[in-house]
Image (cartoon, rainbow, N blue to C red):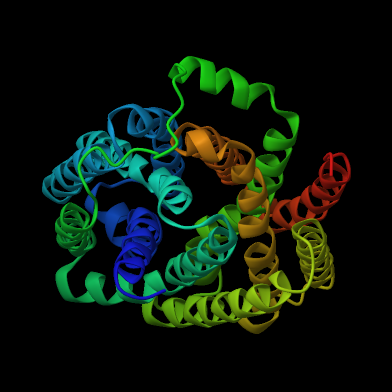
């Protein structure tokens, strides 16, 4: 990928990176937010679930509108809304106002879904799976590494630094998108069907739903584990913000290496087999975490082992499942991606909110969910028409 292709790839990668910025970079600021708004850490964790819930719904709007009005127009509008929400969060003086502007920021971040649509629009079919794998691996690594950035922002600028940092990054991406994308850059294969008609076709395609459900199950495990790590490592194991960020940095490096491994496998095995291998690793991670808890061997190192195995699982499963699903609706990529991403993030939001209420059994529930979801994913993959 050279020239304009490189610029497009950078744009797609930035879309993925910045969409996760407001979730993971905020994690080291949980204690500061709790103190600022006089709110328990568990309630601050629930704000992540609220963000994800609004985020998932906003994708159902952004994707179809981009098919109708154009990718560039919707992308710029969403980024502007996200910037306003971030600034509002930084200026909030009470928790209710903070949640309100977090919801506005989440609505704007619905542009995340356009990354998948732009892959379909801007790259040839033989390159799409590879491009999607690369940018999802980079974004996943950023998700894990972002608490290190968040820790620096927290110690340097207090919790508001996270939101001002997001606003600056979003502004830079807005300028880049304005320069790279042509006006009315909707799908070049835009079909003359209504948005509702496309959504109906997507909802009735069982294989499409099954592929996205597999991606949703794996992402729910990943998201649930990441969203509770502040409570586990900082509250229970008493790690400092910086130590916690280093733990997730290791996780991010392994995630990046997992992407390299996935790229190697993609050229040699089918997407279906790659999915099954990843689901097998997720099951192994669940079994190991269960044994660690049963033997009461909880330390930073022992918890990292199943975390790292689960990271490898995510890098194998998500890009393969999403690429297989998107191949079925390349002509309506925006609407298809919005429907699929909504399935994935709604699943993550509900599961993480439920996990936050399990109290002392939190890690055991996560471990068992790894096992159950991997088996469920295997069964779902087996039912897909080849």
Q: Where's residue 66, x and y in %? A: 34, 34
Residue 349 vertical placement versus 166 (above, below): above
Name the quadrant containing residue 14.
Answer: bottom left
Looking at the image, residue 358 sits to the left or right of residue 135; the answer is right
Residue under the image location 67 percent in, 57 percent down: 320
Name the quadrant containing residue 328.
Answer: top right
Looking at the image, residue 376 sits to the left or right of residue 168; the answer is right
Looking at the image, residue 286 sits to the left or right of residue 379; the answer is left
Q: Where's residue 85, x and y in %? A: 19, 42
Judge whether residue 62 can be spotted in this image.
Answer: yes
Q: Nearer the viewer, residue 110 or 308?
A: 110
Quadrant of the rendering where the N terminus is positioned = bottom left
Residue under the image location 33 percent in, 62 percent down: 8
Return the residue found at the far left. Answer: 91
Residue 102 vertical placement versus 198 (above, below): below
Quadrant of the rendering where the C terminus is positioned = top right
Residue 188 vertical placement versus 219 (above, below): above
Name the quadrant containing residue 176.
Answer: bottom left
Residue under the image location 50 percent in, 39 percent down: 337
Q: Where's residue 113, x and y in %? A: 42, 44
Q: Where's residue 286, x and y in %? A: 79, 62
Q: Nearer the viewer, residue 264 or 339?
A: 264
């Amino acid at each position: 990928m050279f020239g304009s292709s490189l610029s497009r790839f950078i744009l797609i990668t930035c879309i993925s990176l910045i969409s996760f910025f407001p979730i993971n970079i905020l994690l080291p600021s949980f204690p500061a937010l709790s103190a600022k708004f006089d709110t328990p850490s568990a309630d601050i964790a629930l704000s992540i679930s609220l963000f994800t819930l609004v985020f998932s719904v906003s994708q159902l709007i952004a994707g179809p509108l981009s098919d109708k009005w154009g990718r560039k127009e919707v992308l710029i509008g969403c980024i502007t809304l996200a910037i306003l929400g971030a600034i509002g969060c930084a200026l909030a003086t009470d928790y209710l106002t903070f949640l309100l502007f977090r919801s506005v920021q989440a609505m704007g971040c619905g542009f995340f879904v356009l990354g998948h649509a732009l892959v379909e629009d801007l790259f040839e079919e033989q390159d799409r799976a590879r491009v999607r794998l690369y940018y999802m691996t980079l974004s996943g690594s950023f998700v894990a590494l972002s608490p290190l950035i968040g820790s620096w922002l927290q110690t340097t600028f207090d919790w508001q630094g996270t939101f001002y940092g997001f606003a600056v990054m979003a502004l830079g991406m807005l300028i880049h998108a304005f320069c790279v994308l042509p006006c009315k850059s909707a799908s070049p294969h835009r079909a003359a069907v209504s948005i509702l008609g496309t959504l109906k076709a997507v909802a009735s395609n069982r294989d499409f739903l099954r592929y996205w459900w597999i991606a949703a199950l794996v992402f729910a495990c990943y998201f649930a584990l990441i969203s509770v790590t502040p409570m586990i490592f900082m509250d229970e194991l008493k790690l400092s913000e910086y130590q916690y960020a280093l733990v997730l940095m290791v996780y991010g490096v392994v995630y990046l290496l997992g992407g390299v491994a996935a790229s190697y496998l993609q050229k040699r095995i089918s997407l279906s087999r790659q999915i099954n291998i990843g689901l097998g690793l997720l099951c192994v991670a669940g079994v190991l975490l269960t044994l660690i808890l049963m033997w009461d061997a909880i330390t930073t190192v022992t918890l990292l082992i199943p975390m790292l195995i689960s990271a490898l699982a995510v890098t194998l499963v998500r890009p393969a499942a999403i690429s297989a699903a998107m191949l079925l609706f390349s002509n309506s990529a925006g609407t298809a991606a919005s429907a699929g991403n909504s399935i994935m993030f709604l699943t993550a939001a509900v599961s993480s909110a439920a996990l936050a209420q399990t109290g002392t059994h939190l890690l055991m529930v996560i471990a068992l969910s790894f096992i159950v979801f991997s088996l469920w994913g295997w069964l779902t993959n087996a039912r897909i028409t080849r």
